[in-house]
Image (tube, rainbow, N blue to C red):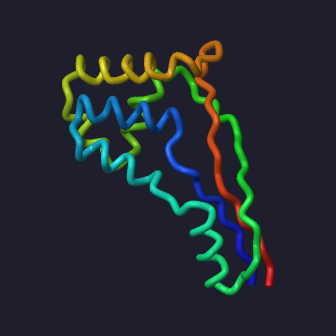
Amino acid sequence: GRILLSVWEGETPYTRALSTVVERHAGAQAAATLRTSRICPNPDALQLLVSQAGFPDMPVRARTLHRRLPPIAHFVLRHLAATPVADAVAALSEQARAQLADEARKALAQYQDGDAVVFPETAHVVSAVR
């Protein structure tokens, strides 16, 4: 058999900022829903799971890429519209949605690169054949 896994390390600057502004505007439950997607096993737990699946002693390697997103003020609301919190965000007033997007932009200002936002994102990767 073969196995190839790529598992996020956890929150990124983007997901942290997004969860924070969603909590402020759409509530704690919506933010918790967003954060759930980033609850992932740590490298030791991942290695144990892979070993239990019959792939012993396979190294877990961290790989970091630099995620590049379009202008955040425009991207955030489109991204949220494709998540499980879409209804909670859509229920906000137009003004509240604009404020949410602007707060996300400000929270990510240190990652600004021209019109884009660039931030590191790490995944733990396991590849094996038995």
Snapshot quadrant of residue 119 = top right
Decide: is 4 above or below 84.
Answer: below
Decide: is 43 above or below 28.
Answer: below
- Judged from this view, the residue extending furthest toward the top is 114
- Quadrant position of the N terminus in the picture: bottom right
Q: Where is residue 40 in the image (x, y as percent from the top left)?
A: 50, 59
Decide: is 7 above or below 53.
Answer: above
Seen in the image, is 126 located left or right of residue 17?
right
Seen in the image, is 69 located left or right of residue 92?
right
- Quadrant position of the C terminus in the picture: bottom right
Q: Looking at the image, how many numbered discs can be counted on the residues?
A: 0
Work out whether residue 90 or residue 126 is closer to the camera in this orientation and state it: 126
Seen in the image, is 40 located left or right of residue 84?
right
Q: Position of residue 105 (x, y in %)?
A: 45, 19
Residue located 63% across and 27% down the image:
118
- Judged from this view, the residue extending furthest toward the front is 44
Snapshot quadrant of residue 66 = top right
Work out whether residue 101 or residue 20 is closer to the camera in this orientation and state it: 20
Seen in the image, is 65 located left or right of residue 111?
right
Q: Position of residue 122 (x, y in %)?
A: 64, 46
Q: Position of residue 18 (x, y in %)?
A: 40, 33
Residue located 23% across and 35% down the image:
26
Residue located 59% across and 23% down the image:
117
Work out whether residue 48 or residue 128 is closer to the camera in this orientation and state it: 48
Snapshot quadrant of residue 116 = top right
Residue located 53% across and 20% down the image:
71
